[in-house]
Image (spheres, rainbow, N blue to C red):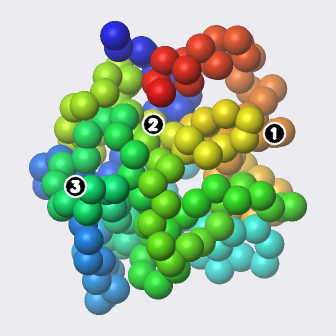
């Protein structure tokens, strides 16, 4: 059964390569990288590594030529990523993988050297098992967010990276116009 994903969380598009979004086991840090860019439709910029004074080192660039986003799959294969399957999300080289972790400031994420298969990507229907075309606006979910899985969204923060979860304190009030807490919990349960 398909579950319609709310437009407010369909904010990311992966581009920089043709075809469908694929995993890759070797990421090259040469020049602009050999991954994808991750466009945010909310601010019309690209999520990237950026040194910050507080919170996780994430930010945005207007440079769509940075192709630093890459994915790994638990099975270790290099193939098309299917909607709804677990993936590791990396940005750049080194300790490139993002994983859920508690922080006192900013989004609850940290960098890790090893892949953490806690991310899932969905198209607008929420249908599982379908390839994800590059350039298509998608929703990105993290299964480890507490108290339950949540979507990664743009969040205008006074300090730290401008990303958050729909349940982040500054975002919760914005949810009431499109989804009740009960409705949100049902949506998350349907996508698991």
Answer above or below: position of 30 versus 180. below
| Front disc: 3 or 1 | 3
Going from N to C along the chain, the mark reached first, 3 or 2, is 3
Q: Residue at x 48, y 27 (%)?
A: 192
Instruction: Look at mark 1 in the image and give the residue it sits on.
Output: 170
In the rendering, at what x and y percent does residue 95 appear? 52, 80
Instruction: Look at mark 2 in the image and give the residue it sits on.
Output: 139
Does residue 138 appear anywhere in the picture?
A: no
Q: CA distance from mark 2 to mark 1?
A: 19 Å
Instruction: Look at mark 3 in the image and give the residue it sits on.
Output: 22
Dot 1, how many residues are within 10 Å of its Cα: few (below 14), some (14-19), or many (20+)? some
In the rendering, at what x and y percent does residue 174 appear? 74, 26
Dot 2, how many residues are within 10 Å of its Cα: few (below 14), some (14-19), or many (20+)? many
Which element carries disc 1, helix, strand or loop?
helix
Q: CA distance from mark 3 to mark 2?
A: 16 Å
Q: Residue at x 33, y 61 (%)?
A: 72
């Amino acid at each position: 059964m398909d579950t319609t994903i709310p437009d407010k969380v369909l904010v990311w598009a992966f581009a920089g390569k043709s075809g469908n979004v694929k995993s890759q086991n070797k990421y090259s840090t040469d020049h602009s990288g050999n991954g994808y860019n991750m466009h945010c439709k909310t601010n019309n910029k690209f999520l990237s590594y950026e040194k910050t004074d507080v919170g996780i080192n994430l930010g945005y660039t207007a440079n769509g030529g940075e192709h630093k986003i890459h994915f790994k799959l638990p099975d270790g294969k290099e193939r098309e990523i299917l909607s709804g399957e677990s993936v590791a999300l990396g940005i750049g080289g080194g300790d490139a993988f993002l994983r859920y972790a508690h922080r006192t400031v900013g989004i609850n994420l940290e960098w890790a050297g090893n892949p953490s298969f806690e991310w899932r990507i969905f198209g607008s229907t929420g249908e599982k098992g379908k390839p994800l075309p590059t350039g298509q606006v998608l929703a990105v979910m993290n299964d480890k967010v507490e108290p339950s899985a949540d979507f990664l969204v743009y969040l205008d923060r006074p300090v730290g990276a401008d990303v958050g979860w729909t349940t982040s304190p500054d975002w919760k009030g914005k949810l009431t116009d499109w989804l009740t807490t009960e409705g949100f919990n049902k949506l998350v349960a349907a996508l698991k």
